[in-house]
Image (tube, rainbow, N blue to C red):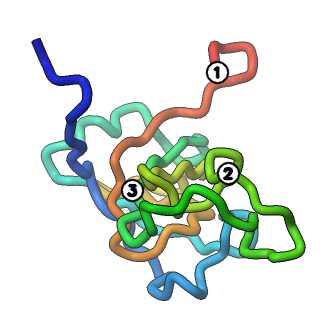
Amino acid sequence: MSDSTNFSLKPIGYVRSSLVDLGAAPMQGKEGAPDAWIELESELTPGLLRLSAGDDVIVITWFHLAARDVLQLHPRDDTSLPMTGVFGTRSPDRPNPIGLHRVTVREIDGNRMRVGPLEAIDGTPVIDIKPVLDRTDDA
């Protein structure tokens, strides 16, 4: 039997972006984030089959610079907003700092996929990519 309380994730690739300063990155992609490249491990290139420019995907990242001990915060760092449990926010600071980014595929070039807009900073590990399902699908 496997131990369901301990498991590991392996990055499938990394974000390559002009965003290098965490403090300067927008909080959400639609707030002025640039396009960025996702550079996959070369052996995973076949996983891009049938994805093409114009497709919407969810990029799942690991916020490697996030604080993992935060359980409550003011949303968007706005102290005029009430303290909120981290699970009711999109904050990157959380026990398991997983990022979800809905982006549009702009271009695929070998093991690289340009997507946008993406607010993740350069070097952010990517742990998965999933297609966006229509509302009629089991989303």
Tell which circle, 3 or 1, labels the residue nearer the N-terminal end: 3
- Count the marks: 3
Q: x, y (%) of residue 55? A: 58, 41
Tell which circle, 2 or 3, labels the residue nearer the N-terminal end: 3
Q: x, y (%) of residue 132? A: 60, 33
Secondary structure at badge 1 equals loop
Q: Marks 1 and 2, Cα distance to the nearest angstrom?
A: 25 Å
Query: Between residues 90 and 40, which one lies in front from this camera angle?
Result: 90
Q: Marks 2 and 3, Cα distance to the nearest angstrom?
A: 20 Å
Dot 3 crowding, Cα within 10 Å, few <14, some 14–19, many 20+: many
Q: x, y (%) of residue 80? A: 89, 74
Picture quadrant of residue 66: bottom left
Q: Marks 3 and 1, Cα distance to the nearest angstrom?
A: 22 Å
Whether residue 42 sits left or right of residue 17 in the image: it is left
Q: x, y (%) of residue 59? A: 48, 48
Residue drawn 47% across and 56% down? 107
Q: Which amino acid, by three-letter code, is at mark 1?
A: Ala
State the residue position of label 2: 85
Vertical side of 9 occupied by 69: above or below: below
Contact flag, marks 1 and 2 (Cβ < 8 Å)? no
Whether residue 30 sits left or right of residue 100 in the image: it is right
Q: Which amino acid, by three-letter code, is at mark 2?
A: Gly
Secondary structure at badge 2 equals strand
Q: Quadrant of the N terminus?
A: top left
Vertical side of 6 occupied by 65: above or below: below
Q: Which amino acid, by three-letter code, is at mark 3?
A: Trp
State the residue position of label 3: 62
State the residue position of label 1: 139
Dot 2 crowding, Cα within 10 Å, few <14, some 14–19, many 20+: some
Whether residue 102 sits left or right of residue 7 in the image: it is right
